[in-house]
Amino acid sequence: MNPILRQLIIIVVVMAAVLTASAGLIWLERRLLALWQDRYGPNRVGPFGLMQVMADMIKIFLKEDWIPPFADRPVFVIAPALLMVTVLMSFAVVPFAPGIVVSDLNVGLLFFLAMTSLGVYGIALGGWSSNNKYALLGAIRAIAQMLSYEVFMGLALMGVVILAGSFNLSQIVTAQRKLWFCIPQFPGLVIFIIAGFAETHRLPFDLPEAESELVAGFHSEYSGIKFGLFFVGEYLGITLISAMIVTFFFGGWLGPVLPPILWFVIKTFVFICGFILLRASLPRPRYDQLMSFAWKVLLPLALLNLVVTGGIVLAIG
Amino acid sequence: MLSHLRTIWQILRHSFQKPETIQYPEQKPYLAPRFRGRIILSRDPDGKERCVACYLCAAACPVDCIALQAAEDEHGRRYPAFFRINFSRCILCGFCEEACPTLAIQLTPDYEMCEYDRQNLVYEKEDLLISGPGKYPDYNFYRMAGLAVSGKDKGQAENESDPVDVHTLMP
């Protein structure tokens, strides 16, 4: 087959699959939260309430696309798109199965980190251009939180890079053929998961939104499809971080019997459920607790993990 | 940290618990006999209206949803000429039931009274009045009270002795 055509098909399929999955997560999250809170959740529209997502989508498309008169118009419009685009770009380097990857970059890991860093712009600009104090407060929190958690998100992954000897995500996966990195890199895994929660600003680290303090945080002024973009962007972020946890620490597509793509999907699904479970169980920390936890606990731990891993690899190799 | 893990574990165990939800239109919830729902006006055991139009319920009502007009029939018994409850205002607090001296106004375990038109929530006396005595089967105000009405003079109520003639000197 024509390689360009093949690549185009992969791009379209990946985008469609990822967007559909993220929209489906809205339903999944509501059902799972309900399950853990001894409720049913949406179960009226269609079988198991599955059509609820469609109903919500139709509703959000038909809502008035309101831009507040005091907002900075161009930036206000661009911000949600920016968030979506950066998250979607990160999926370009995710190796779903051998050969099924949009762009097999040699610096895939760095590209992923760079794109999650850019994701903060969508939130920061959204909060800033809203010209609303709550939105601005949310944006300030988002910037500080995401910048500080990014530092050791990268550092936690360096242990993986040392073990795999590559920044290429496909090679990182194949390097786990004997042993998944979740065992030798357990501290790295824990730190990466915590940082991932902060990066996606999900509960318990949803301080940029913090609906009990800041109305809706950075997207207070957004409505209609722009709010929908922020909303789906959040679920895309969850899918991305889960996919990355699987890729870096749980052997990506590797697994017996079942086809590789299925293994990847199953593993990712488990971590997505983990995201929702943590939302159901943990309360939100105070802002200063969040920051001091990042700089005083996680950063030293990540550095220590890096030093120890590097030392062991040097001593053996 | 350990307590966080314990919390997560406990929440995870809820996966296997039955939901508490009552799926309402198909499944009806249990309503206690003293549930405060739709308001009714009850009747005496002998089929007469209990309401004596004393206005106490209207006075007690915190949202002013009760309106009535007193009248008197040929036997000297008071009754409401009209009795109107606006259920779009009513908060089902039950204060009217507590205030009622004749046990006429009562709240029932029924809450399904949705209407598409707000005006239909204004219940008139014929909508409110039921044919039975409600929660108090034996109570009859005029048989208990000392008030004279036609067919029952002073001293003829239950547990009531004859009135004392204050003009006589005899003990």
Image (cartoon, coloured by chain):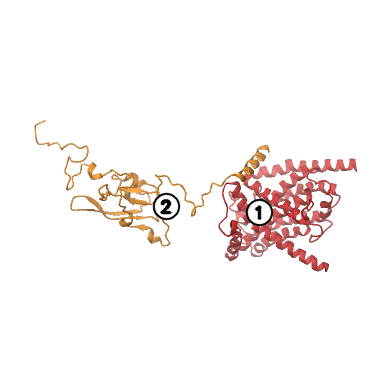
Chain colours: A red, B orange
Q: Specify the amino acid type for callout 2.
A: Tyr
Residue most toward the right?
A317
Of residue B64 and residue B161, the one placed in the foreground of this image is B161
Left or right: B149 as drawn, with respect to A149: left
State the residue position of label 2. Answer: B111
* A80 lies above or below B58: below
Q: Specify the amino acid type for callout 1.
A: Ala
Residue A139: assigned label? 1
Q: Residues within 10 Å of mark 1 (few under 14, many from 20)?
A: many
Please report, as a chain letter, where disc 1 is located. A
Residue most toward the top?
B171
Which residue shows up at 22% across the image and 43% down it? B143
x then y, percent, for residue A124: 68, 56
SS at badge 2: loop
SS at badge 1: helix
How many badges with numbers are in the image? 2
Would you identify the image quadrant in which residue B5 lies?
A: top right
Q: Are marks 2 and 1 in contact (CB under 8 Å)?
A: no
Please report, as a chain letter, where disc 2 is located. B
Of residue A287 and residue A260, the one placed in the foreground of this image is A260
Q: Quadrant of the N terminus of chain A?
A: bottom right
Which residue shows up at 47% across the image and 49% down it? B29
Q: CA distance from mark 2 to mark 1?
A: 46 Å
* A238 lies above or below A4: above
* A184 lies above or below A117: above
Q: Is residue A203 visible?
A: no
Which residue shows up at 74% across the image and 63% down it? A13
Left or right: A246 as drawn, with respect to A78: right
Of residue A67 and residue B157, the one placed in the foreground of this image is B157
x then y, percent, for residue B139: 28, 43
Would you identify the image quadrant in which residue A130 lies?
A: bottom right
